[in-house]
Amino acid sequence: MQIQSNFSLKPYNTFGINVRARYFSTFSDIEQLKELSSHNPMTIGTPPARFILGGGSNILFTKDFDGHVLKNDIRGIAKINEDDEYVYVRVGAGENWHQFVLFCIKNNWQGIENLSLIPGNVGASPMQNIGAYGVEIRELFLELNAFHVHEKSIHKFNLRDCQFGYRESVFKKNHKDQFVILDVTYRLNKTPRFNTSYGAVEKELQRMKVHDLSAAAISQAIINIRTSKLPDPAAIGNAGSFFKNPSVSKEKFAALKTEFENIIGFENSEGSIKLAAGWLIEQCGWKGFRKGDAGCYDKQALVLVNYGGATGAEIYNLSEEIRQSVIEKFGVALEREVNII
């Protein structure tokens, strides 16, 4: 077990924020995690605060972390069962999400292709209930195993236990900072049930001249769409969509429609109207805005970026200015999708 001190986290967060952890360790199995969670790297005093780090794709560090960062590096992909309709696949939380999607496509396991190129690791997928282009993790999820950091015990969570919502789960609310996700099991289709309901996907498939629809073709279409709109974190620091799409009542939407006739909104399953946060931000004049090295991406207003030397505090302050302007113009409060540390 190796514990490093004064460790730079810049390579471990997709914003590329140059902060340091007081202590840093990695774990690749449950025994290492148990040992690290019981170990106090300080010779005197109480154990330092802990933070479990995955792919670093949905966090914004605003300052140095005065505690112990534990990086989840649990790997492995295994088919554990199958029936006439489904194949059941268990995946280590430290596996790269996109590489897992490609692995499924290669093995003709269907249903996950719409989630191509989402950054981060598998462990974040149920925590965030990640979703894109008409598909959310809760539609594919079977169960997960998680380690309770205080009880030092392993708990199994099924679909109901996770309490999935829009980019939400019990791990971001009631059980926040209590569990470390170890592995996730997905239920994937053995026969195609393709989802091309998003217009942008259909349009891209037409542009690609796809005649025989396949998971690989849908995946490539979504990769093309995402790369055309979103910056590569290796080139420009970012965490993808910074804000959630807000929901308003039908009455509120009708009132907004009378004042802003081009406002974008879609009815969701709860009966409210989901607004396009990127459109709201763009109407407030932020798209392409840059102050120092903190900015709002010029191809997608929903993405905040670090052009090289921005601090987390500068990006956070920019996000707060954006939130306030949207409230003032539309009377709608945006909620951050990115976790602020």
Image: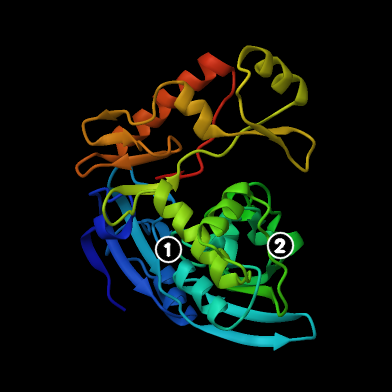
Q: Residue at x 28, y 42 (%)?
A: 306
Q: Which mark is residue 258?
A: none
Give the colour scheme of this rendering. rainbow
Q: Residue at x 32, y 28 (%)?
A: 289
Residue type marked 1: Gly
Left or right: residue 271 compared with residue 95: right
Based on the displayed image, in which of its 4 quarters is residue 313 positioned?
top left
Q: Position of residue 97 (x, y in %)?
A: 48, 67
Q: Position of residue 211 (x, y in %)?
A: 61, 68
Left or right: residue 130 compared with residue 33: right
Examine the rendered structure and indicate whether residue 230 appears above or below residue 154.
above
Examine the rendered structure and indicate whether residue 22 appears above or below residue 324.
below
Question: Given contact means CB atoms under 8 Å apart, are the residues at marks 2 and 1 in contact?
Answer: no
Which of the pair 328/161 is nearer the observer?
328
Decide: few, some or many residues near mark 1? Use Cα within 10 Å; few <14, some 14-19, many ≥20. many
Q: Nearer the viewer, mark 2 or mark 1?
A: 2
Quadrant housing the C terminus:
top left
At numbered mark 1, what does the secondary structure look like: helix, strand or loop?
loop
Examine the rendered structure and indicate whether residue 89 appears above or below residue 149.
below
Query: Gap in Å between the C-alphas at discs 2 and 1?
Result: 22 Å
User: What residue is shown with label 2?
Assistant: 139
- Marks 2 and 1, the one that precedes in the sequence: 1
Q: Which mark is residue 54?
A: 1
Quadrant housing the N terminus:
bottom left
Based on the displayed image, in which of its 4 quarters is residue 308 positioned?
top left
